[in-house]
Image: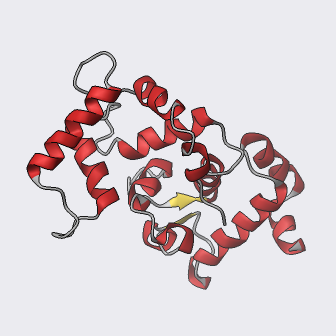
Amino acid sequence: MGTTASQLGKDLLSEYQELTFLTKQEILLAHKRFSELLSKEDRNLTSVPMEKVLSLPELKSNPFRKRICHVFSTSDMKDGSLTFEDFLDLLSAFSDSATLEIKSHYAFRIFDFDDDGTLDGGDLEKLVNCLTGETEDSRLTPEEMRQLISNILEESDIDKDGTVNLSEFQHVISRSPDFVSSFKIVL
């Protein structure tokens, strides 16, 4: 454990603590897990490919795992690869200590599949398919999907523009007591 701490350096470790909702121990564990994702030949790389990040047991069964990588990735190539700082941002947003505002902001971005700043019918359909699975047995019929999206918009679309914006989403989330405790990833 001492080598991991010295690899990060005390100043950098303190900076990461200030900029995230993570403790020193959580940052050190994150660094260890991130380093393990890099093979011996990749140790000089600054980012981990999305495929390797998706192999983490904590993400493997998450239906939004690819969207999570894309939202937190700062890669210019838009390939979902994560730097260590991207990885810390991800863990920070999903930590128990993150605020409702932070968690709901990132949940909104994850659910905004087309990255246009609103949740429209297409985003909601993809969201429902991620949650229900996309097999023939679990997929909703087109009529069930239309009805569900209509119900979601009826409940959430306060300004009645046919989409859910961030503030509308946060309003809905604020009435969901389980959201903060369920929106988490623990290493």
Q: Residue at x 81, y 53 (%)?
A: 23
Q: Residue at x 18, y 56 (%)?
A: 140
Name the quadrant of the N terminus: bottom right
**Which percent across, then down, holds residue 17?**
79, 47
Above or below residue 184? Residue 101 is above
**Which percent across, then down, holds residue 170?**
48, 29
- Residue 6 shows in the view: yes
Name the quadrant of the C terminus: bottom right
Quadrant housing residue 122 = top left
- Which of the two residues, 33 or 85, is positioned nearer the viewer here? 33
Q: Residue at x 31, y 35 (%)?
A: 119
Quadrant housing residue 148 = top left
- Residue 120 shows in the view: no
Q: Residue at x 89, y 55 (%)?
A: 10
Above or below residue 103? Residue 82 is below
Q: On the rendered structure, is 122 left or right of 26?
A: left
**Which percent across, then down, holds residue 106?**
50, 41
Report how many numbered discs are placed on residues in the image.
0
Q: How is the image coloured?
A: secondary structure
Q: On the rendered structure, is 64 left or right of 105?
A: left
**Which percent across, then down, holds residue 18?**
79, 41
Q: Residue furthest bottom?
A: 40
Q: On the rendered structure, is 180 left or right of 27?
A: left
Above or below residue 41? Residue 90 is above
- Which of the two residues, 16 or 183, is positioned nearer the viewer here? 183
